[in-house]
């Protein structure tokens, strides 16, 4: 069985971060989201993995390499335009050949992994298995309707959903999905929808089994979901101190201090993780905060946030919270007078000031 990991989307909901970075490489608990998907496939016994890549392919290749660091073999498959999940399947036709495969969206997280689900699919020998989760906003997802425990209708982002069962970003298919994807037409948004391909399988009398995920799952495509995923992962981590902490500092609850990090006259209240070679000085880092590598936080307070690599937060008097701060960013006080707020922000940014 092979894996197909999708990493070709443009990440418009996480702009401006994704103007310069692949959304699948934004870290959750100091690990790029995409790595969780690779590890989930590997832990399910799938070591031959194709990665669909687009405009950010060079960044993805640099981050993941040939897969040896994960114990897998990675094959990169270029998709010229993000024209839908079913189009991604067709793009990978040569790589997949006649193999059964797991398709895993690279910005999704399933905390319990997929090992048992892959085993269930292989045991039941269905033509497809779809993972479903109950959500409060099904109109933002592909939605499945069940009858007698079987899938009988799927609709992509319906205006009036008839079910609260959203399609989780993990699917399992046999070779028939190639015929299904080749038989459908582009949707109103110009994409070949995987929901239409699965519906084709249902309509043709093929076996599509559902599995309702009871543990937590997150599509990390939006800021609030990224922060919640970060919170969930941090809550599962064990305390580990590999860096240096001076006598004037206090570490509370589950705190991870990675190698080379320095904590000086500061309080770190977990769950929180401080990345390698990062320095926290005269500061407070609150719960559910991830600070990546080579950062500096000085005389500031930050909590429930993600700070990307090589960024600085310097001498900020008010607490920063609920934030995703990009890489190589500097946030600092300005001594200039007259006092004013000055910003340089990317497209679709949102700033609250009081």
Image: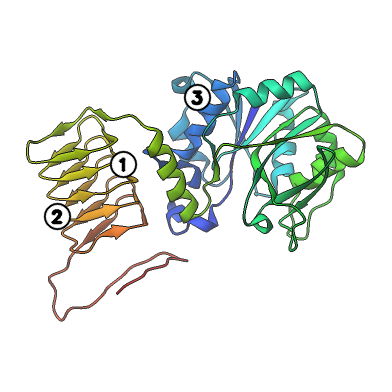
Residue at which label 2 appears: 299
Q: Earlier in the sequence, mark 1 or mark 3?
A: 3
Label 1 sits on a secondary structure element that is loop
Q: Nearer the viewer, mark 1 or mark 3?
A: 1
Evaluate if marks 1 and 3 touch, with contact meaning CB atoms under 8 Å apart: no
**Residue 1 is at least partly visible in this image:** no
Q: Quadrant of the N terminus?
A: top right
The answer, for residue 236, to whether it is visible in the render is yes
Label 2: few (<14), some (14–19) or many (≥20) C-alpha neighbours in 10 Å? some
Question: Label 3 crowding class (10 Å Cα cut-off): few <14, some 14-19, many 20+?
Answer: some
State the SS at label 3: loop
Of the two numbered discs 1 and 2 on the same chain, state the one appearing first in sequence: 1
Residue 139 falls left or right of residue 7: right
Q: Disc 1 versus disc 3: distance between alpha carbons?
A: 24 Å
Picture residue at 75% right of the left edge, 62% below the top: 160
In primary-sequence order, the first of circles 3 and 2 is: 3
Q: Which residue is mark 3?
A: 66
Indicate how the structure is coloured in the image.
rainbow
Q: Is residue 351 above or below residue 205?
A: below
Instruction: Measure the C-alpha gap from mark 1 to mark 2.
Output: 18 Å
- Residues 287 and 299: in front is 287
Label 1, on which residue? 292
Image position, residue 204 (x, y; %)? 92, 38
Provide residue 228's location: percent of width, then percent of height: 45, 48
Quadrant where the C terminus lies? bottom left
Q: Residue furthest front?
A: 148
The crowd level at tag 1 (other Cα within 10 Å; few <14, some 14-19, many 20+) is many
Left or right of 306, for residue 43 = right
The residue under the point 59% across, 21% down is 44
Query: What residue lies at 60% left-to-right and 23% top-to-bottom?
Result: 115
């Amino acid at each position: 069985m092979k894996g197909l990991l999708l990493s070709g989307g443009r990440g418009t909901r996480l702009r401006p971060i994704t103007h310069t970075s692949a959304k699948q490489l934004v870290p959750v608990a100091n690990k790029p989201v995409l790595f969780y998907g690779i590890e989930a496939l590997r832990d399910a016994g799938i070591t031959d993995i194709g990665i669909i890549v687009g405009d950010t392919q060079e960044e993805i290749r640099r981050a993941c390499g040939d897969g040896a660091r994960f114990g897998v073999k990675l094959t990169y498959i270029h998709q010229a335009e993000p024209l839908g999940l079913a189009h991604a399947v067709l793009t990978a036709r040569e790589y997949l050949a006649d193999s059964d495969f797991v398709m895993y969206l690279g910005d999704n997280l399933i905390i319990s992994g997929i090992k048992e689900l892959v085993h269930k699919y292989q045991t039941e020998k269905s033509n497809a298995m779809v993972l479903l989760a109950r959500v409060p906003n099904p109109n933002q997802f592909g939605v499945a309707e069940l009858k007698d425990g079987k899938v009988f209708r799927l609709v992509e982002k319906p205006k009036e959903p008839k079910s609260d069962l959203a399609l989780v970003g993990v699917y399992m298919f046999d070779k028939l999905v190639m015929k299904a994807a080749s038989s459908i037409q582009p949707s109103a948004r110009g994409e070949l929808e995987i929901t239409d391909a699965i519906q084709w399988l249902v309509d043709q009398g093929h076996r599509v089994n559902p599995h309702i995920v009871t543990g937590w799952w997150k599509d990390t495509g939006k800021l609030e979901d990224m922060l919640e995923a970060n919170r969930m992962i941090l809550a599962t981590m064990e305390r580990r101190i590999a860096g240096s902490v001076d006598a004037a500092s206090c570490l509370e609850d589950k705190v991870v201090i990675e190698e080379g990090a320095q904590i000086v006259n500061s309080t770190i209240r977990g769950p929180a993780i401080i990345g390698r070679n990062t320095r926290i000085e005269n500061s407070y880092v609150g719960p559910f905060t991830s600070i990546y590598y080579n950062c500096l936080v000085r005389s500031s307070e930050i909590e429930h946030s993600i700070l990307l690599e090589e960024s600085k937060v310097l001498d900020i008097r008010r607490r920063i919270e609920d934030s995703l701060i990009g890489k190589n960013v500097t946030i600092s006080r300005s001594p200039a007078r007259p006092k004013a707020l000055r910003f340089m922000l990317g497209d679709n940014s949102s700033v609250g000031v009081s």
